[in-house]
Amino acid sequence: MVFQSTRNNSPAVSFKEALLNGLAPDGGLYLPEFIPTLPSDFFVGLQGRSLAEIGFVVAREFVGNEILEGELKPLIEDVLSFDIPLVEVSPGISTLELFHGPTMSFKDVGARFMARCIAHLDRNANREVTVLVATSGDTGSAVANGFWGVEGINVVILYPSGKVSHIQEQQLTTMGGNVTALEVNGVFDDCQALVKQAFGDEELREKLRLTSANSINIGRLIPQSFYYFYALAQREDPLDPVAICVPSGNFGNLTAGLMAKRMGLPVTQFVAATNANDIVPQYLATGEYHPRPSTKTLSNAMDVGKPSNFERMLNLYGDSVEAMQGDIKGFHYSDEETMACIAEVKDGFGYQLDPHGAIGYLGLQDLQKSNAIPGVFLETAHPAKFADVIEEHLGVEVPLPPALQELMDKPKEAVQMDPNFEEFKSYLLGRN
Ligand SMILES: *Cc1c(COP(=O)(O)O)cnc(C)c1O
């Protein structure tokens, strides 16, 4: 399989190159040259298939002969070493719990797959790869965890000092080994600017093999399609009509679902649900796309004003808003609605949502007002990761699971840095 830029102005590349490049040279995002259709017997036998089995069948289509089947199988099993159960929350609404991985957000799936694929594809290189990531919270820890202990790869994470939650900071700064955390005296945009400048610096590019692991990387997107099939595999009849609602920020998760649909996923309707950052729901309603600076909300992992994967969505629908509207309905919710939903679902059904999942739940509820179809929403993070907001707004305590409790007691290790490129550059060169 080869991969092409959404802007069609760069050469097509292999899976390995697409992973290592991240962004295409023309500034576009990589997509496979075509989306393969899975054989019909895959769907006939879908019920009861294991997550790893599904992952293997789907991944094989994209990695082609770059990773041999005998090597792909254990790699996928290692990536998907935790379950992604489908759980009923209320009548007609189930959730796909994507938070049972090591950092308790769905981002674990993409980060682990990408890390293991790079390690495998690059195993004969004689120079190490340095992965640079700027993070406002969840991405950094999933990437760090995904690459942790992977030979031949160093990870440098930049996070804004005082701007991530205590849990997130512990997740970023206690890994050790091949993972270094840089605590930048600035905001997220400063971290991102440093990373961008590093990629544009010839000397750095020459001396270090830099790569990025942010959500534009196709290596994170492909594995996110696995669990859509696995969600349906856990239903009584995987071929029954179903709506899937995806709480969205950069729209990577939803784009992976749209790719799964092209592969044959029997989904009737997608719902894109956002917080106040409703750029895509607005586009679906009006046909006009107006990115803008992001608004801060309580579902902060979705505070995105210029969703990077929108370019891929447009590409998949041939730039036609009508075609996109045929598959996706958009809804958006305020913080008040989000918190009220968390309280209602907890009181009514005993299920603890996190703020992101709550927006997914709300999206399905709204869809079901006009369409009595059963629905699945993605629960993208463990509620304990947002225990502070839930406690503050609802006065409900969310107990920390043992793995997070243990993490809270580990000593923090971070390198302090000013948002100064020369300082950052000499730090990177000095490590080598
Ligand atoms: C990253 C993240 C999202 C947004 O996912 P996208 O693929 O960027 O749309 C939603 N919820 C949580 C908890 C996240 O960490």
Image: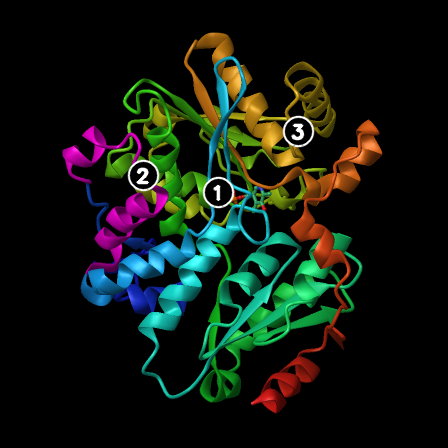
Residue 152: x %, y % from top left = 44, 80
Where are the magenta residues, as a range? 38-64
Quadrant including the C terminus:
bottom right
**Residue 55 vertical placement versus 122 (above, below):** above
Residue drawn where x is 31% and y is 18% of the image: 240
**In terms of secondary structure, where does tag 1 sit?**
loop
Q: Is mark 1 within 8 Å of ligand 1?
A: yes
Please say if 216 is above or below 24.
above
Measured in 3D between alpha carbons, the distance from the residue under mark 1 to the one under mark 2, in whole angstroms, is 14 Å
Q: Which residue is mark 2?
A: 260
Q: Nearer the viewer, residue 130 or 404?
A: 404
| Residue 110 visible somewhere in the drawing | yes
Q: Amino acid at mark 2?
A: Ala
- Callout 3 amino acid: Gln
Judge depth for marks 1 and 2 and give the one in front. Answer: 2
- Structural distance between the alpha carbons of marks 2 and 3: 28 Å
**Vertical side of 195 occupied by 100: above or below:** above
| Residue holding disc 1 | 251
Marked residue nearer the N-terminal end (1 or 2)? 1
- Along the line of sight, which residue is nearer the eye, 49 or 166? 49
Side of 152 relative to 348 (left or right): left
The x, y position of residue 161, in whole percent, is: 77, 63
- The residue carrying mark 3 is 352
Quadrant showing the N terminus: bottom left
Q: Which residue is nearer to you in this view: 99 or 309?
A: 99
107 in magenta = no
Judge the density around disc 2: few (<14), some (14-19), many (≥20) Cα neighbours within 10 Å: many
